[in-house]
Image: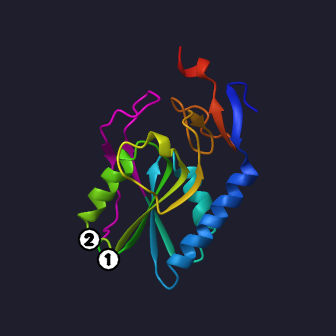
Amino acid sequence: MHPNIEKVLIDEKTLKMRIAEMAAEISKDYEGEELLVIGLLKGASYFMMELTQHLSVPTQIDFLKVSSYGSGTSTSGKVDIQFDTSRNLAGKNVLIVDDVVDSGLTLKAVRELFRTRNCKSIRLAAMLDKKERRLVKMVPDYYGFVIPDEFVVGFGLDYNEDYRTLPYVGILKRSVYEK
């Protein structure tokens, strides 16, 4: 375990098992359909790659880079699209993939943006759900784990670009980000 991690919240084996279960749910829901999976960079990249490996439906991938955190630990409330998807979404079944649903503002903004692009369907998948932090009514269609209101890193989640490559989700020690 990394010395700046207070506690491992979800180990690698548990993460990967649940993500495979999520992929089975998604595959069942999209049976006979094609799916365009759009990951929110950078945090969702690890989750998205693990998830798409287990999908049994024809799948294409793309990315969107949005930010609502800056360099802090809580949302700014303003969602900034920094890099848009390169795909025409009209008529596509779109699955938006994010690492964690926190305030819900980011996914709400992305979903509203995609609604203007004539998608056949739009669903949301998140590896982690912090329900107690929600500022808007937002429920992901698929989620891996409901977690407490702690600052977590690993498996794609970072703090100032560090800790993203940890193979588990862990709680970052407060002393690291409350300097």
Query: What residue is shown with label 2?
Result: 118
Please tell me which residue lies in front, 61 or 13: 13
Q: Are marks 2 and 1 in contact (CB under 8 Å)?
A: yes
**Which part of the image, by quadrant, shows the N terminus?**
top right
Res 18 visible: yes
Q: Residues within 10 Å of mark 2 (few under 14, many from 20)?
A: few
Residue 4 is a magenta residue? no
Quadrant of the rendered structure where residue 77 is?
top left
Q: Can you tell which quarter of the image residue 74 is in?
A: top left
- Which one is in front, 163 or 109? 109
Residue at image position (46%, 78%) is 34
Residue 79 at what x, y percent from top left?
31, 42
Residue 65 forms part of the magenta stretch? yes
Q: Residues within 10 Å of mark 1 (few under 14, many from 20)?
A: few
* Residue that appears at 52% across and 82% down: 31
| Furthest residue toward top | 179
Magenta-highlighted residues:
63-89
**Label ID, residue 12:** none
Nearer the observer, 46 or 123: 123
Q: Which residue is depicted at the point 42% across and 43% down? A: 134
* Position of residue 47 measured from the top left corner of the image (x, y, whole percent): 58, 54
Furthest residue toward front = 132
Which mark identifies residue 91? 1
| Residue 125 picture location, percent across and down | 49, 59
Q: How is the image coloured?
A: rainbow
Under mark 2, the amino acid is Asn
Question: Which secondary structure type mostly characterizes the magenta part of the structure?
Answer: loop
Q: Is there any visible trace of residue 84 in the rendered image?
A: no
Label 1: element kind? loop
* Residue type at tag 1: Gly
